[in-house]
Amino acid sequence: VGQLCNQVQSALEEAIASREAALTAEREQSAQKEETLDVTLPGRTPRIGRKHPLLATLDDVVAIFLGLGFRVAEGPEVENHYYSWEALNYPDDHPAMDEQMTFYINDNVMMRSQTSTVQIRYMQSHEPPVRVIVPGRCFRRDTVDATHCHTFYQTEGLLVDEGVTMADLRGTLEAFAHGMYGERCRVRFRPDFFPFTEPSAEFALSCTICGGEGCRVCSHTGWLEVGGCGMVDPNVLANVGYDPDRYTGYAFGFGIERITMLRHGIDDIRLLYSGDMRFLGQF
């Protein structure tokens, strides 16, 4: 009986060892097939990043104005009271100074609410003629909704020289509109008020969605308000040491988000800052 048990044990051990060797060989063979590199297969195309639609539009805006002879100027995003208000001819009780509109760091330092502050800095260090475009981020205490955000991009334009008129301003904005949206795009001026320009105007573009016929996007008016503009107030020129009797100039400003939304038919500004690749992948 003992001899028989030893024979059975030996037979079982040999069968187990044989099966284990077979399974190991099968596993190794399968792994080799999976890990084998087929050099005849085409390579995998890497995902290549693209510009964010907001920054791509900003680059195109700058390129248009560079073609019109403007230079690019930049300035700090944190400003003091003088550059934000006083030098731009704001009265002491202007509502834009309220905390509801501006992010204050202390009583004299704040996040800039517009790129107009760079106009003053540039004119202080350059003699006329001046022709600059100022792109950059701005900050306001706006409630975030489909058309407003606390952080946004703005582009400011400034030209100061002898004999500059409102007609030059209109011609510049028309050239911009045609360069961005095509020759069929029209520009409309309406009287408005800004402390640093006189006379001032709100300028609008014919709706790019309906071609000016009227639709939901333009509230059935055929026009979309884009920004503000006007002739530089003589007080602003005097504040930087320019002779207002000799020099005149114009200034304009508009939000890049609005230009981007009109360009691509986007109906909610929050999509631009969502980081959603399903949205961004369309551009």
Image: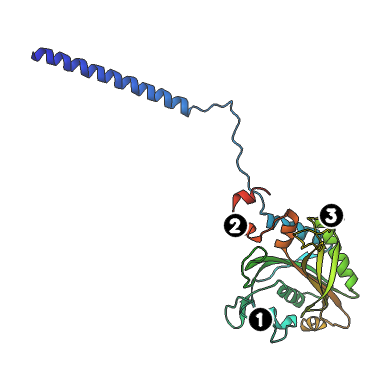
Q: Which is nearer the eye, 62 or 179?
A: 179
Q: Label 3, label 2: how many angstroms apart (C-alpha)?
A: 29 Å
Instruction: Say whether marks 3 and 1 touch (CB < 8 Å).
Output: no
Residue 231 appearing in the image: yes
Quickly name the residue at label 2.
274
Q: In which quadrant of the rendered view does residue 91 lie?
A: bottom right
Q: Residue at x 30, y 19 (%)?
A: 19
Query: As displayed, is residue 184 above or below residue 200?
Result: above
Earlier-in-chain disc, 3 versus 2: 3
The amino acid sitting under disc 2 is Ser
The amino acid sitting under disc 3 is Gly
Instruction: Residue 97: give its label.
Output: 1
Earlier-in-chain disc, 2 versus 1: 1
Q: Is residue 280 left or right of residue 252?
A: left
The x and y percentages for residue 96 are 68, 79
The amino acid sitting under disc 1 is Met
The x and y percentages for residue 149 are 64, 66
Q: Is residue 278 left or right of residue 13?
A: right
| SS for callout 1 | helix
Query: As displayed, is residue 274 above or below residue 31?
Result: below
Quickly name the residue at label 3.
182
